[in-house]
Image: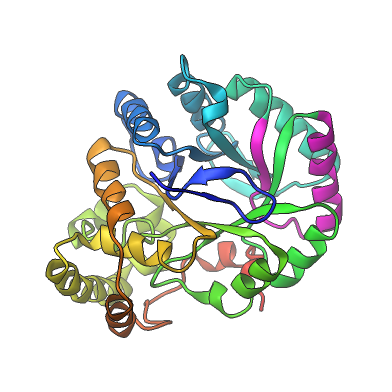
Amino acid sequence: MQETRLGQHGPQVARIGLGCMGMSDLYGPADRDESIATLHAALDAGITLLDTGDFYGMGHNEMLIRDALQGRTREQVQISVKFGALRGPDGSWSGYDCRPAAVRNFVAYSLKRLGTDYIDIYRPARLDPNVPIEDTVGAIADLVKAGYVKHVGLSEVGAETLRRASAVHPISDLQIEYSVISRSIEKAILPTARELGIGITAYGVLSRGLISGHWSRERTGQKDFRNLASPRFQGENLDANLALVERMRVLAQELDVTVAQLAIAWVAAQGADIVPLVGARRRDRLQEALGAADLQLRPEDIARLESIVPPDAAAGERYNAAQMNHLDSEMG
């Protein structure tokens, strides 16, 4: 698999990364053996970047990655960890804590659960409104000096926060939602990241499965945060969004690819500084996603897709109102 560098300051990684959240949390039950087999298949295929969060399954995801990496060479993998989200024993969410003391506490537990001496990229999951970003980044920078962290990343922050953070310490990459139906970063965030030499790790490239070509109304009854709390998966919004997918399917069939491959390839085509994170938690879905690595969309293919799915075509916000309020990236 081809590789690229995450921005001017980040590590060398494969052009596609693996987002591991769904193997532990939020997308309904997952099979442990299949999850580990999928992680192994990803590594064997050349994927090097594994993305997790210490709050995915309240530590479960980190321990799953630890078990999957047994017998593997640690230096061949980059582990990206998000921290700061606070959860209760019932799985509820109760805000964020990105104070320097909390940063040191969170990283200690992550290192133990991952069974590693260092984390490749460490990032706050969201901007803590009560803590200046300079304080949080400064605390991670101290961990870099101590050797516990290799690179500083950010997640879902806006252009001004990017500037403030990068003035404290070089930022390897910004992890943010980016897909053909979620393009708000193109207005100010992406140009600012490029100006500052910050890479993009794009999650939600399939909009959590919505534009994978596999989602259907029959799945709306399942216990899954998408059905319970994501406006794009609800009511008339879902009908409108699935109609977009069917229009995408016509183009995908003409190109002899799947809808998912088309959507992933579109993100990858936006620049070598953008690494799509695919959220596959089964080997068959991973194999499909990997097919996008060989898909080179022509300018006319990109133009057709963007005419089928113009900016702001998606019905509904990408999160519910409470979660949208935590997104510095959506504050202008």
Magenta region, residue range: 119-146
Where residue 25 appears, as percent x and y from the top left, is 44, 39
Tell me if residue 130 can be seen.
no
106 lies above or below 302: above
Residue 88: quarter of image: top right
Tell me if residue 323 can be seen.
yes
Residue depicted at 18% across the width and 69% down the height: 249
80 lies above or below 32: below
Residue depicted at 67% across the width and 63% down the height: 157
Quadrant placement of the C terminus: bottom right
Quadrant placement of the N terminus: top left
Q: How is the image coloured?
A: rainbow
Q: Is residue 137 magenta?
A: yes
Frontmost residue, 331 versus 192:
192
Residue depicted at 65% across the width and 48% down the height: 10
Residue 220: quarter of image: bottom left
Residue 232: quarter of image: bottom left
Frontmost residue, 264 versus 269:
269
